[in-house]
Image (tube, rainbow, N blue to C red):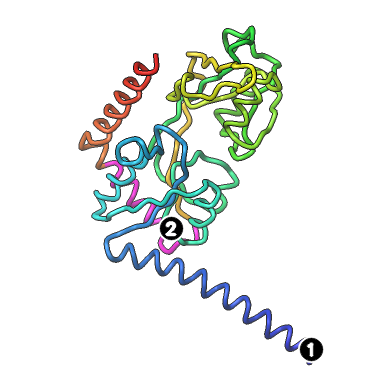
Amino acid sequence: MRFKKRLVYWFCLLFLIFLVSHSHQSAAQSGANKGKVKLATGAGYSPFVDSKLPEGGWSASLVKQTFSKMNLLATIEVLPWNRALKWTQEGKFLAAFPFVYSKSRAESFLYSTAINFVPVHMYVASNSQFTSPEQLRNKRLCFPFSYSLDSLEQGIVDKYQMTINRVKDGIGCIKHVQKGWSDAGLTNGYIHAEKLPKNDVSGVSIVIFPEQLALVPLYLLISKDYANAQQWVEEFNYAFGLLQKSGEQTATQKMYLELIDNLRISTQ
């Protein structure tokens, strides 16, 4: 008798979980039917996602324009990156962006065409003796736990035969390098060294090498469990293609590159 009660309990619990999950996806789908889609992103990834830039950043602008080509209004919610991905997988959002490719994510998500590319550069502490990436062979590279090593970034590690030190996040890596616990880190080449925090104690700043080591694509992701997920990705890709053919994508790129250059000039 007790076994039957437990069985009924677990059945009811699983059914409740199914209903909650289904209701989230139904709500997201109904929004799409009304001409709106809900998207998720993270924060602090300038210039791709940045509340201080037009349209919330370069990637945000392109994504909004792409859905506009699909006659859909995209609303974007800024969340912690892991939560944005988790809630998209659960169907609370149609899609999340911008993310690099990883094998683990590819098990659960479909990837759009690349919407942006990240120029990868290496940085060191200003008080170090390093003046080029070549001098970092067999040295220690800091890399955040929250990031997955893209194949292109792994190529950098392999090329210079570097040892990886893992820390919590990007700011943690900067501090690690400033303290001499790691010899170098990798950064988005659009970031200005002047904008990175100095070591509060020693005043050590960061130097970013001018050499571009890789160009990493960024994507919009849709959960494989989302209703008609493959069709959504195909329609997004087609609309993004229209954006490219019309010249709007190029115009947006030009605008953001000019903004980045102006910010660089203002900090010098």
User: Crowding at label 1, few (<14), some or many (≥20) Cα neighbours within 10 Å?
Assistant: few
Query: Where residue 242 appears, x then y in whole percent?
Result: 25, 42
Mark sitting on residue 146: none
Number of marks in picture: 2
Residue at the outermost front position: 201
Q: Is residue 153 above or below residue 20?
A: above
- What predominant SS class does the magenta segment belong to? helix
Quarter of the view holding residue 147 = top right
For the N terminus, the image quarter is bottom right
Q: Is residue 107 above or below residue 207?
A: below
Instruction: Identify the amino acid type marked 2.
Output: Phe
Query: Where residue 125 appears, x then y in whole percent?
Result: 60, 15
Residue at image coords 27%, 35%: 249
Query: Where residue 207 appears, x then y in whole percent?
Result: 54, 15
Residue at image coords 38%, 65%: 29
Instruction: Identify the amino acid type marked 1.
Output: Arg
Instruction: Tell me the CA gap for discs 2 and 1.
Output: 40 Å
- Judging from the image, what secondary structure is the residue with disc 2 in? loop
For the C terminus, the image quarter is top left
Residue at image coords 35%, 68%: 30
Q: Circle 1 sits on which residue?
A: 2
Residue range corresponding to the magenta coloring:
224-241
Quarter of the view holding residue 177 = top right
Q: Circle 2 sits on which residue?
A: 93
N-terminal of the two: label 2 or label 1?
Answer: 1
User: Crowding at label 2, few (<14), some or many (≥20) Cα neighbours within 10 Å?
Assistant: many
- Judging from the image, what secondary structure is the residue with disc 1 in? helix
Query: In the rendered structure, does residue 231 fall within the stretch colored magenta?
Result: yes
